[in-house]
Image (cartoon, rainbow, N blue to C red):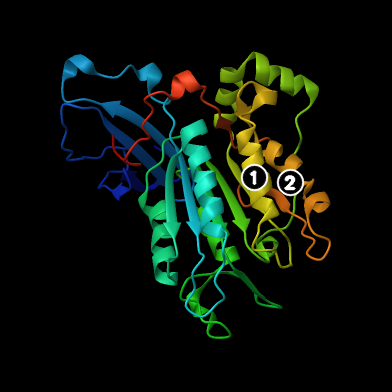
Amino acid sequence: LDESGIAEIMVNGVSVAFTQNGKFNLDQNFTSTWTKLVISAKDRNGNIATDSFIINKSSKKLADPNDLNTSQTNYALLFATSNYDTWPDLANPLKDVEKIGALLEELYGFKVDIKVDLTFDEMDDVIEHYTEKTSYAPKDQLLVFFAGHGHYKPGKGGWIVAKNSELDGSLRTYLKFTQIRDYFNATYSCNHIMLVFDVCFGGTAFDKTDVRNYSESDMRFIRDSTAQFMEMKSKIKSRLFITSGGEEYVPDESKFAIKFIETLSTKGAKKGNILTFDDFTDNLQLMSIATDSKTPTTPRYGGFGDHDDDGDFIFLHKPAKAQKGFEPKSAPSMQ
């Protein structure tokens, strides 16, 4: 219900018919296993509320309402483009992305989806799937990583270069940075999104904004009450970005990827088994020291779009015992 009226109701990404008194009907097949429903309601002013719950065919096994929003799925969508039709091929994007994907899955329990050497249309379809066709629960997080060539034209902005992008040709076969940014920002059902661009000119997609580093009192709060800290952060919307450089070229042998991998490998040792956004930015600030002076790069980072103050993106390290027998969830919208 809303004073301005309801514009749309979606269940697991599918629109359903409804009345303005808030009632709607849904035909849903159930099995003997649990089924997850994610319901989103949008009012006529464009505001969106989302909730999720899990139900079972047997009335004897109904989920406890107090546990409805405790589940969380972390998604990692990683693009690696190394082989191009007309642009020069690259040696390292796939190697870097595979290392990052393995760490995210094995250490932090992410559901990893690696996309390799996609054309413009294929990349566009994947982005559409994750921004428009995937249903997210309130605590779910989405990390998106691009590795490959970037392109820039003064006065026109920067683009991701796809496998079939035409060198010195039409820009219609490129994905514009700002459009990618806006697509993910408008993914209203996902409260926590982090975009990472390890490409040339990636910083042209964003205006740098400062993100607060944690104080000593925050650090104690994290170490002493990790669960409480994560619960608090899960309620604050986050839209965060990191780029390997600004309006500049970045080398194929990515120092940025090395620092990103180093950060993941620390397993959140300083903060009670969690990594926060500023763990990555703190480490990336050392890049200027490690980077060859002939190709200096300065990472950019901050919040974008609808990012709320104090919003964050949390990587929870799962100790070896907890990881034993771990299997990532197979489907984002239904369980």
Residue drawn at point x = 63 percent, y = 62 percent: 199
Q: Toward which corner of the image does residue 314 lie, by quadrant? A: top right
Looking at the rendered structure, the kind of residue marked 1 is Phe
Q: Toward which corner of the image does residue 112 lie, by quadrant? A: top left
Seen from the viewer's position, the closer of residues 179 and 299 is 299
Is the residue 252 above or below the residue 22 in the image? below
Number of marks in picture: 2
Residue 18 at x, y = what percent?
27, 44
Within-10-Å neighbours for mark 2: few <14, some 14–19, many 20+: many
Is the residue 201 above or below the residue 1 in the image? below
Residue highlighted by disc 2: 284
Horizontal relation, residue 243 to residue 80: left or right: right
Disc 2, disc 1: CB below 8 Å?
yes
Which numbered disc flags the more N-terminal residue, 2 or 1?
1
State the mark number for residue 260. Answer: 1
Label 1 sits on a secondary structure element that is helix
Seen from the viewer's position, the closer of residues 301 and 103 is 103
Looking at the rendered structure, the kind of residue marked 2 is Leu
Residue 262 at x, y = what percent?
66, 40
Residue drawn at point x = 66 percent, y = 21 percent: 222
Label 2 sits on a secondary structure element that is helix
Within-10-Å neighbours for mark 1: few <14, some 14–19, many 20+: many
Residue drawn at point x = 47 percent, y = 50 percent: 77
**Can residue 30 be seen at all in this image of the molecule?**
yes
Residue drawn at point x = 74 percent, y = 46 percent: 284
Residue 323 at x, y = what percent?
44, 25
Give the CA separation, mark 2 to mark 1: 8 Å
Seen from the viewer's position, the closer of residues 74 and 101 is 101
Residue 217 at x, y = what percent?
77, 20
